[in-house]
Every structure is written in structure tokens, then in C-alpha cells.
């Protein structure tokens, strides 16, 4: 198959091909033989590379990690690392291998910002570049051990995908439910990539410092939520400062952290259920926990332990492999959702948040609202804006102008210019009210927000549109 192998490159134009050139070294790009050959060649490297400076997991030295055709050499000291690189050099010379120095990096994980000494590392006569962060298996590792950079990389990728989604022909004309489905199947997986590993990190400092809080109140700590929030604002036709909680409430959409944390919990349970006591991941997770117990250094495993305690699911932690992953994680997810709804309800009913006063009056359950089934983006957006106080009534506009609440009065009626005033009593809209509602009755009208039929809700939206947005 490789005798006289030749390749050509297809140019960006599409149909034209370059001249053929011989392939004398390596395998074809993407060839499935590549990982197998790599495994065969490197099979004994780990065994012939004893390195005292290698880090250990439960007393087992781990000097090197191999995956597909990637290799990671680990050491706790600079001299130990150079020793391993020299060893790799000898090994490669013996077996006729060449390491791509351009694609190789050294990363020094540490607490301090700067490296104390600027040490150079060499392999096959080339300097290996030291970097602050690098990409390993699609995972952005940073020398400070934090996952912020990885998360911001995922946010940037998902934002680009979201932009393409908006440009998809007909996206604006499909229903909100279909738009949410597209988000869940196309954007969410990008945001959640590797969340089994980084999911708990954004919580760590908070869990460590605070004991009494509602877990749901931390929903905005995950940067992935920013993308989801932006998406909600877009499909609901709201500006960038519109408050998040009414949006989530109207869509019946739970924050992303619930899925993110559930993925971490399922990962933990699946590693534990396999009971592979010799598996490195299993041992590393347990060791991380024992480090926390002994030294009080907080990490993802101890964070997981706190979550399990908070929601009172000891079986996830204690009953190693004994509980059904699907059933237990579904139950935990339900608890996290209830916890969030509790936080959401406390917030919208908190009298100190005057912005939610009207919303609290018309919304009691965290569920998808019927008015969002109105076909017209413009009309349903009118209702969304009135519900969540992102309109032009003085009760809201006055907040930005620095007016005291009691001074935000309607110019015509000299009473508080709020949503109830606009809907039921303002003289400016008397004629309009009778135009859109056959029999005008404040109680019936208020009830429309929760129980209106689509036809009634369209009339309501038209009234709001005519009164506030035209
Ligand atoms: Zn008025």
C-alpha cells in the first residue's frame, strides 16, 4: 500500500489539484494505522523510562501519558524533565523516530505567576518552547491549573456557532421551541465540552468560603451561561441589559450549570462503577479527595463531595458502583432544578427588586409561556418586554434617569407610570383599550397573562405594541 505512495493537495478553489509528490515517511493524514503504529512503537517507552522525579498517584509513578499519537512526559523537576527528554531522544534514535519540535511544548504548572528560573529544555538538538497554556486533546490547559481560559475558548467557539445559527435561512421564522431545540443540539454540546472535568471548578472558591446559600444563586458563575443568556435575549427580542430571571422563567429554561454539574456527577459515578482500582483516573480522583482531607487544599473532587452533601445524595459518594447512574443523576437533576426555581421565585418575589414587581404579579410557575407560541416575533416580544420591565414606561425609564420611584409619574394622570397603570387606568390609552378588548375588565385582562388563548394574547400584544412601541 505504501510502495511508491504519492499525494496531491486539493487547492481551496475546489477542483484543481497540485502536482503529485512522493510520500516516503509517515502515514497518510488521518490514516487509521497511525495510532496503532504509534502504540506499537512506543509500547515499551514508559517501562524503559524510569524517572524518580515523575509525579505519583497513590504511590504509582506516572512519567508519561500516551493517547492516539500524542505523548505527555511528566516531571516534578526541571532536571527530571530534561532527563526524560534525553531518554526519549535515545529511544527515538534507536527506533528511527522523529519528534516534531514545532508541535511540542513545555508547560510548568505552578501557583506563582512567573517562572522562578528560565530553564531551557532540549530534544533532538532543538529547544522545546515553554508556553503558558497549550491545547491537549481539545482541552486548553493553563499553567495556573485554572480552567477559565478553557471556558473562554469554549465560549468563543460557541459564540461563532451561534452567529452561524442566526444566519441560517429561516431561523427567525421558526417557533421558539424549535429555536431552543437547535440551541440544545448545536450550541450546548460546544459549551459543555469536557465539562465532566472542568464543570465544578467555577464553584470552588465559593463552596469553600460559604456554607449558607441557595445553590441556584450561583448560576451565573459559569461563563457558558453568558452564551445561553445572549441566545435567550436574541430569540425574545430583548436588549443586552434585560434581566435574566424573567427570560429564563418565561422560557422555562434552566441555567446551564445544572447540565454541566450533572455531567461531572455522571462521570464520577461511571469511573467509580467500573471499580477499576488500577485505573489512573479512579486513583487520581480519590487521591485528590484525600489531599483535601489532609491539607484543606480544595479541588474538583472535594467540590463534588460538597455538592453531593448539599443535595443530600450520599449514595453518589459512598455506594461505589451500587446505584444506577441514570436514575440517580435524573433524581439529582430534578433536585437541582427545584433548588434553582426556589432561588428564582425568591428573587422575583423579593420586594426590594422593584423591577420584578409586575412580573411577580403575573407569573407564579417556572414554565414555558403560551404567549411565546404567537407566530409574530414582534408581537410576542411586546409581551416579553412588558412582563420583564424592559419598556419605556417611566417606572423603568426613571430608574435610568435617577428619579425616585415616587417621582416616576405619568404626565397625564400624575400617578405612578407603571405596567398596571398603563394596562388599566391611564387616560391616554382609554380609547385604545376599547379598540383591542371587547369587554374591558382589569381582572380578566390580568388573567390573560397566565391563561389567555393565542387569539386573546395577540390582541393583548397589539395593544401593548400600539401603546408603548409605536
Ligand atoms: Zn396615565
Image (cartoon, grey):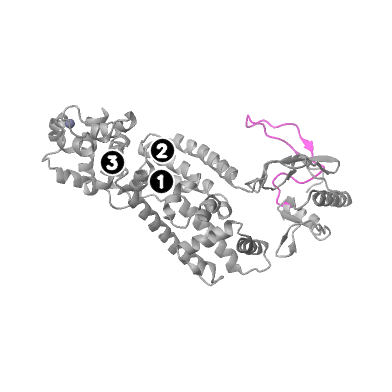
Q: Secondary structure at mark 3?
A: helix
Q: Contact (CB < 8 A) between labels 3 and 2?
A: no
Q: Was residue 29 drawn as part of the magenta stretch in this picture?
A: yes
Q: Position of residue 432 (x, y in %)?
A: 15, 31
Specify which label sits upstream in the sequence, 3 or 2.
2
- Looking at the picture, tell me which residue is in the foreground, 118 or 338: 118
Q: Position of residue 270 (x, y in %)?
A: 57, 64
- Looking at the picture, tell me which residue is in the foreground, 163 or 55: 55
- Most common secondary structure along the magenta stretch: loop
Disc 3 residue crowd, few under 14, some 14–19, many 20+, Cα 10 Å: many
Mark nearer the viewer, 3 or 2: 3
Mark 1 to mark 2 CA distance (whole Å)? 11 Å
Can the viewer see residue 50 in this picture? yes
Specify which label sits upstream in the sequence, 1 or 2.
2
Q: Quadrant of residue 112?
A: top right
The residue under the point 14% across, 38% down is 437
Q: Secondary structure at mark 1?
A: helix
Q: Which residue is mark 2?
A: 171
Q: Which residue is mark 1?
A: 180
Specify which label sits upstream in the sequence, 1 or 3.
1
Q: Is residue 299 left or right of residue 402?
A: right
Q: Is residue 252 left or right of residue 207?
A: left
Location of ligand 1 given as a quarter of the image = top left
Q: Which residue is mark 3?
A: 387
Mark 3 to mark 2 CA distance (whole Å)? 25 Å
Which residue range is magenta in the image?
7-34
State the quadrant of the C terminus: top left
Q: Was residue 132 drawn as part of the magenta stretch in this picture?
A: no
Q: Position of residue 25 (x, y in %)?
A: 81, 44
Q: Quadrant of residue 280?
A: bottom right
- Looking at the picture, tell me which residue is in the foreground, 333 or 33: 333
Disc 1 residue crowd, few under 14, some 14–19, many 20+, Cα 10 Å: some
Amino acid at each position: 500500500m505504501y510502495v511508491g505512495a504519492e499525494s496531491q493537495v486539493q487547492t481551496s478553489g475546489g477542483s484543481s489539484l497540485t502536482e503529485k509528490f512522493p510520500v516516503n515517511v509517515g502515514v497518510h493524514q488521518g490514516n487509521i494505522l497511525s495510532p496503532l503504529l504509534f502504540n506499537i512503537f512506543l509500547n515499551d517507552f514508559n517501562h524503559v523510562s524510569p524517572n524518580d522525579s515523575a509525579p505519583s498517584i497513590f504511590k504509582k509513578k506516572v512519567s508519561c501519558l500516551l493517547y492516539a499519537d500524542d505523548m505527555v512526559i511528566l516531571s516534578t523537576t526541571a532536571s527530571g524533565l530534561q532527563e526524560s527528554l534525553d531518554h526519549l531522544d535515545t529511544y527515538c534514535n534507536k527506533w528511527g523516530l522523529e519528534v516534531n519540535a514545532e508541535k511540542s511544548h513545555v508547560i510548568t504548572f505552578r501557583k506563582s505567576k512567573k517562572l522562578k528560573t528560565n530553564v531551557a529544555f532540549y530534544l533532538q538538538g532543538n529547544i522545546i518552547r515553554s508556553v503558558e497554556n497549550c491545547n491537549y486533546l481539545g482541552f486548553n490547559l493553563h499553567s495556573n491549573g485554572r480552567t477559565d481560559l478553557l471556558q473562554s475558548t469554549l465560549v468563543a467557539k460557541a459564540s461563532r456557532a451561534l452567529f452561524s445559527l442566526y444566519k441560517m435561512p429561516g431561523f427567525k421564522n421558526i417557533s421558539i421551541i424549535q429555536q431552543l431545540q437547535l440551541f440544545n443540539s448545536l450550541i450546548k454540546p460546544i459549551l459543555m465540552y469536557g465539562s465532566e472535568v472542568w464543570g465544578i471548578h467555577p464553584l470552588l472558591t465559593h463552596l469553600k468560603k460559604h456554607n449558607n446559600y441557595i445553590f441556584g444563586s450561583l448560576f451565573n458563575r459559569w461563563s457558558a451561561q453568558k452564551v445561553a443568556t445572549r441566545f435567550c435575549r436574541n430569540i425574545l427580542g430583548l436588549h443586552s441589559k434585560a434581566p435574566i430571571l424573567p427570560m429564563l422563567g418565561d422560557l422555562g429554561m434552566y441555567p446551564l450549570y445544572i447540565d454541566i454539574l450533572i455531567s461531572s456527577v455522571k462521570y464520577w459515578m461511571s469511573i467509580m462503577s467500573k471499580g477499576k482500582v488500577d485505573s489512573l483516573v479512579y486513583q487520581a480522583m480519590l487521591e485528590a479527595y484525600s489531599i483535601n482531607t489532609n491539607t484543606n487544599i480544595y479541588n474538583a473532587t472535594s467540590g463534588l463531595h460538597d455538592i453531593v452533601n448539599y443535595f443530600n445524595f450520599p449514595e453518589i459518594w459512598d455506594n461505589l458502583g451500587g446505584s444506577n447512574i441514570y436514575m440517580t443523576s435524573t433524581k439529582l437533576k430534578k433536585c437541582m432544578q427545584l433548588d434553582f426555581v426556589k432561588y428564582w421565585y425568591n428573587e422575583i418575589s423579593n420586594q426590594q427588586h422593584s423591577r420584578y414587581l409586575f412580573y411577580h404579579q403575573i407569573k407564579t410557575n417556572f414554565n414555558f409561556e403560551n404567549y411565546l407560541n404567537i407566530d409574530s416575533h414582534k408581537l410576542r416580544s411586546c409581551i416579553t418586554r412588558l412582563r420583564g420591565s424592559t419598556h419605556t414606561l417611566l417606572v423603568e425609564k426613571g430608574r435610568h434617569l435617577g428619579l425616585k420611584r415616587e417621582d416616576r409619574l405619568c404626565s397625564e394622570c400624575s400617578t405612578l407610570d407603571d405596567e398596571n397603570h398603563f394596562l388599566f387606568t391611564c387616560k391616554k390609552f382609554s380609547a385604545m383599550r376599547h379598540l383591542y378588548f371587547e369587554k374591558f375588565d382589569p381582572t380578566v385582562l390580568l388573567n390573560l397573562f397566565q391563561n389567555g388563548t393565542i387569539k386573546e394574547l395577540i390582541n393583548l400584544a397589539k395593544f401593548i405594541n400600539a401603546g408603548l412601541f409605536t
